[in-house]
Amino acid sequence: MNIPTESYSDKFEQYSEALAWLNKIGVKFSASRIKHYHKTIEYWKDNYRDADDLEVKNEFPNFFSSLFEIYDFIEIYKAFGNEPTDNLHHIIEKLQKGVNGPIHSHDESATSTEARNFLFEALVAAKSHNPEKGIEAILDAFTDTGVSIEKTKIWIECKRIFSKKKLQANIKKASKQLISHIGRNIGTRHKGVVAIEVTKLINPANDILVAENDSKLKSYIDQTMDSFIQENSEVWETIYKTKNKKIIGTIIKFSFMASSESRNLLVHSSQWGVNPRPGISDDDKNLLIKLTNKMNER
């Protein structure tokens, strides 16, 4: 995991570029939540140093939420900003849905998760995409997304998990979807992976993670990922035992807003982890490791 060092002004500029790109490729967002984030960050980047206690109390939660939300859009823009628009039809469809939904993620309900669900699918594709390194998102995937890596196609079903009691049901559903799709592709070069986003399990109150310095922040986040996998891997491993052996593992992602006290800067920290299915080949393990190493690049 890398700790970002950009200022709020830098992030505002990057987000502005991302919104200009969304407009260019035809995503409509005139009254959406992402316009709200832009206005919030534009104000705060120039005023946070001089804000009084009352303003901080009233406005900081809104700024915090906005800063947390913009990173996915920036990452997607970085990955696909130079791709011809004609190649991005599926990504554009996901983004058009992804710009909607409640402004703050903590206001999501069972009936309003669709926007961020589609955004997570687009993010998985974006974080997997680096043609120069031989890892390329399958932009017309018939699963939620897919990745071509070392002549192997990895088909991915994505689930955002909101409670531990829903973890098993979501893994079962994703596995069933993968089996349905993999069944159409009988070659050995087709694999399946379940990708889960678990931020709300790990940090349901949206607390800011505070660490003494970047090294301790990184250590804590690495430990959090290891602990989550250790505590929950039996859930998906039990499900995979009865499923097609082409399902080769689980990718896990979560994000925090964090403060490294040595730099006194609020930063977005995310982590992608992997738990290979027991008994898969070393080649398949290496594919998963290569993929998640790419995802953890900034």
Image (cartoon, rainbow, N blue to C red):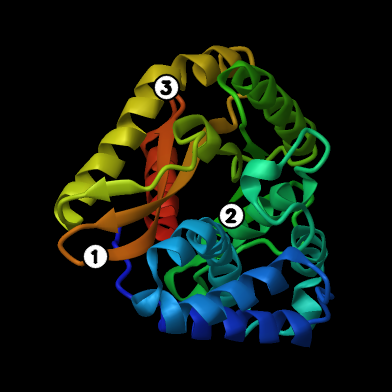
Q: Which residue is mark 3?
A: 278
Mark 3: give few (<14), some (14-19) or many (20+) Cα within 10 Å: few
Q: Position of residue 285 (x, y in %)?
A: 39, 39
Q: CA distance from mark 1 to mark 3?
A: 42 Å
The residue under the point 67% across, 52% down is: 121
Question: Does residue 165 sit above or below 142 in this rendering?
Answer: above
**Callout 3: helix, strand or loop?**
loop
Type of amino acid at the residue the image marks with label 3? Pro
Amino acid type, label 2: Val
Q: Count the marks: how many?
A: 3
Which residue corresponds to mark 1? 264
Q: Which mark is residue 124?
A: 2
Counting from the top left corner in percent of width and height, residue 19 is at 67, 80
Answer left or right for 147 relative to 29: left
Examine the rendering and report whether any part of residue 298 can be seen: no
Mark 1 or 2: the one toward you: 1
Q: Could you tell me which secondary element the residue under label 1 belongs to? A: loop
In the image, what residue type sits under mark 1? Asn
Q: Position of residue 21 (x, y in %)?
A: 68, 84
